[in-house]
Amino acid sequence: MPHGPYPPELLTTAQMARADRLTIESGVAGMALMEKAAAAIAAAATAFLVKTAGRRVLVLCGPGNNGGDGYVAARMLRSQRFKVRVAALVPPESLRGDAREAASTWDGRVEDATSCDFTGVDLVIDALFGTGLARDIDGPAAVLIERLNAWRAETRQKIIAVDIPSGVDGTSGAIRGVAVQADSTVTFFRLKCGHLLLPGRLRCGAISCAHIGIRSTVLQQIAPQTFVNEPDAWGAALRLPSVEGHKYARGHAVVVSGGASHTGAARLAATAALRAGAGLVTLATPQDAVAVNAPALTSVMLRVADGPAGLSALLEDRRKNVVALGPALGVGEDCCALVEAALAPSPEPRAAVLDADVLTSFALAPERLKEAIANAPGPVVLTPHGGEFARLFHGQRWERTLSGAPISKLERTRDAAREVGAVIVFKGPDTVVAAPDGRASILPHATPWLATAGSGDVLTGIVAGLLAQGMEPFAAASCAVWMHAAAAEDFGPGLIADDIINHLPAAWRRLTATQS
Ligand SMILES: NC(=O)C1=CN([C@@H]2O[C@H](COP(=O)(O)OP(=O)(O)OC[C@H]3O[C@@H](n4cnc5c(N)ncnc54)[C@H](O)[C@@H]3O)[C@@H](O)[C@H]2O)[C@@H](O)CC1
Ligand SMILES: [K+]
């Protein structure tokens, strides 16, 4: 699993190649970058070998600069008296540019990787393919990677990946044919999107990011729009309560409850909105559910709002600046009509969070949802999981471009956000948040315990609570995803949705510690 914190920007492989190019054009030699990259790899390998008292290293080198890093790291490790073997996919004489120069600094034997033997090896360095991977791996290289993974599984020996595990697409996180299963990955300058998107993330092991002499000023030209979902990316937009502020200054969120037998989900969302910092939260309940909701609430207020007309009347109070609906609302036309009431034009701005049954209800009429969003009196955040996303954006079923490159969850979320005009939180272990203007964030670590009943309802409530305080919607949605994961991580095994709410104060503490 990844280790953080990381630099905030995430790059595509094309953006990373541009960062290398811009740096080289500014006068830094490509070999100097490679030496630093290799030094970071050698340091990681040394730390591992010292800890395990291992001595024998096998460096697998590919046909490009990733292989170049491997040759230089091999030389560095041998100079520290480790027993180093190098095995390559192509003969060193066939290499070009920096890779060729790097290989020339290794004066030891170079074995043929496709027939190399792993017996007795303590550590493998995977320098086969990096950000230059351009197609699916097949043939002898694929067989080698399969043999390598089988060796690791059998012997429990370790693999360090140079930049990215070979076979993982650095932009999409897809596996191109086969991919190395690494125990740790040392990447350079900035993480790539494919380090955090599944399934790539699961192939990386612990990720570290080394500085190799590329200045962060190159990012001004590259203008990345994707960020690691950590406080560095959105902390500046956070609204912390001030001593002199009163509760109305922190907004008033309305959460819409389902009928008498479906009330728990909305109560979870409402309580989470309060814990996320909304000044006031009202649960809008149908008359038939009052008797169920009333005894179950204390700090959340309760108001009757039957159907669209009831909700419209409740929302006439202009201080109610966020409405959240979807959890256990029931699928169908009644649900669509409630959403249209919630998004109806209003003289005061009002944000909305749409989740669960709302997303399914509009699956057959996405244009209708798009129109309601276009006319809404404030920003809208949609929080689909995989199934809801697929139903609502079924037009986006292509997994690959015409040239065969995989289309990632990141790009699909970004396209959907642009298409529908709302911030989209595409939930999962690698939750992606995307805004219509193209900004996106990816959650670097989520505990598997988050996949529990009611967890999504709590997330809806946190988004609503942060929006109520006036946080910018992309930042609010990203922050909510982070807090949700941080609270779950704080609680640990055995988590249920109520625990996420109860551990939001711990997430707040962690967050405010990063801000001071
Ligand atoms: N000067 C630079 O550009 C730097 C590059 N660095 C390293 O260089 C790597 C990128 O180097 P490259 O752009 O040369 O790319 P790679 O070394 O990742 O691979 C490119 C080579 O692999 C071949 N190839 C691509 N996909 C293949 C497939 N499926 N099957 C078989 N062959 C395939 C290509 O034809 C090309 O020969 C980074 O990941 C990083 O490790 C670092 O040393 C930092 C500096
Ligand atoms: K690699």
Image: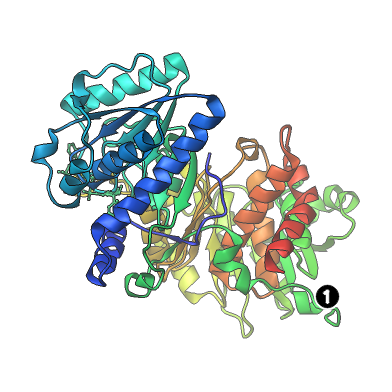
Pinpoint residue 279: horizontal percent, then vertical percent: 80, 70
Colour scheme used in the picture? Answer: rainbow
Whether residue 378 sits left or right of residue 315 in the image: it is: left
At horizontal 47% and vertical 19% (from top left) the residue drawn is 156
Please tell me whether residue 160 is drawn above or below residue 157 in the rendered image: below
Q: Residue furthest bottom?
A: 347
At horizontal 61% and vertical 66% (from top left) the residue drawn is 476
Q: Residue 110 sits in which quadrant?
A: top left
Pinpoint residue 311: horizontal percent, then vertical percent: 69, 67
Whether residue 14 sits left or right of residue 182 in the image: it is: left
Whether residue 116 sits left or right of residue 332 in the image: it is: left
Residue type beneath disc 1: Lys
Quadrant location, the C terminus: bottom right
Which residue bears the numbered disc 1? 247
Q: Nearer the viewer, residue 347 or 40?
A: 40
Q: Nearer the viewer, residue 377 or 91?
A: 91
Ligand 1 has an atom within 8 Å of the beta carbon of the residue at disc 1: no
Q: How many marks?
A: 1
At horizontal 38% and vertical 36% (from top left) the residue drawn is 77
At horizontal 29% and vertical 30% (from top left) the residue drawn is 178
Q: Nearer the viewer, residue 95 or 515?
A: 95
The answer to whether any part of residue 197 appears in the image is: no
Pinpoint residue 507: horizontal percent, then vertical percent: 73, 54
Q: Nearer the viewer, residue 469 or 369?
A: 469
Dot 1, how many residues are within 10 Å of its Cα: few (below 14), some (14-19), or many (20+)? Answer: few
Q: Secondary structure at mark 1?
A: helix
Pinpoint residue 353: horizontal percent, then vertical percent: 60, 62
The answer to whether any part of residue 195 appears in the image is: yes
